[in-house]
Image (cartoon, grey):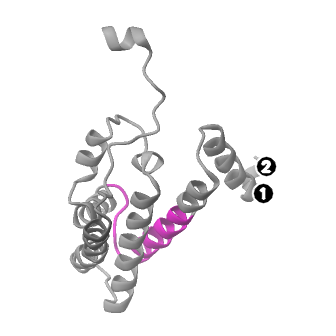
Amino acid sequence: MQETVDPELAINRGRKNWQTMGRSKKWIEQRMLGVETRNKLTDYWSDHGIKKGEEYAKLTNIIHQEWSGLSVKEHKDLKKLDTQNLRDHMDEAELIFTALAELSTRQIAETIKADDYTLNESAAKKGGRISGNARQQSEQQTGKKVISEKNYLPPRKEQDKIS
């Protein structure tokens, strides 16, 4: 009830939860930036004819596929996630490239005045591709893969490993 009156309380609760899970201050800042970037994109979609649910999921998957080379499901499978939020298990680079893809998508959608699914789909492909190209250049220059199997799941107990 207090969070309805003061939404900052919810934000602070989220930060504390991530701290409790052992996330660094830098990771938390990146995750919060990603939330803001995502919200601006979904606000745009909401205001421009995109239906919540299936259409959001399809566009999100297009963006993700374009930047990462993986569908959202494939990325979750790589990280051995079931119902967990994929973004909560991304490392800093994955969060940054996701945010770049979503920011680019929104900016393209705004530029072309995307007001239906088809135009937003085109923006999603182009925005995701911008981040995908940046990811590939980063990987070429650093020799390090951006997409990681790493997750933040608690270690499995010995008896879980045996069964």
At label 1, the amino acid type is Val
Residue 68 forms part of the magenta stretch = no
What is the x, y in percent for residue 37?
49, 70
Checking the image for residue 94, the label placed there is none
Element on which disc 1 rests = helix
Range covered by the magenta-colored residues: 33-53
Give the residue at mark 2: 2
Q: Residue at x 47, y 38 (%)?
A: 152
What is the x, y in percent for residue 95?
44, 60
* Foreground residue among 75 and 91: 91
Proximity of marks 1 and 2: CB atoms separated by less than 8 Å = yes
Tally the numbered discs.
2
* Foreground residue among 80 and 48: 80
Residue 39 forms part of the magenta stretch = yes
Q: Residue at x 27, y 59 (%)?
A: 61
- The majority secondary structure of the magenta stretch comes to helix
Q: Residues within 10 Å of mark 2 (few under 14, many from 20)?
A: few
At label 2, the amino acid type is Gln
Res 16 → quadrant: top right
For the C terminus, which image quadrant? top left
Element on which disc 2 rests = helix
* Foreground residue among 119 and 29: 29
Q: Is residue 6 left or right of residue 145?
A: right
Whether residue 48 is visible here, answered yes or no, is no
Residue 1 lies, with reference to residue 107, above or below; the image says above
Q: Residue at x 31, y 84 (%)?
A: 114
Give the residue at mark 1: 5
Whether residue 28 is visible here, answered yes or no, is yes
Q: CA distance from mark 1 to mark 2?
A: 5 Å
Q: Residue at x 31, y 58 (%)?
A: 144
What is the x, y in percent for residue 119?
24, 80
What is the x, y in percent for residue 34?
50, 63
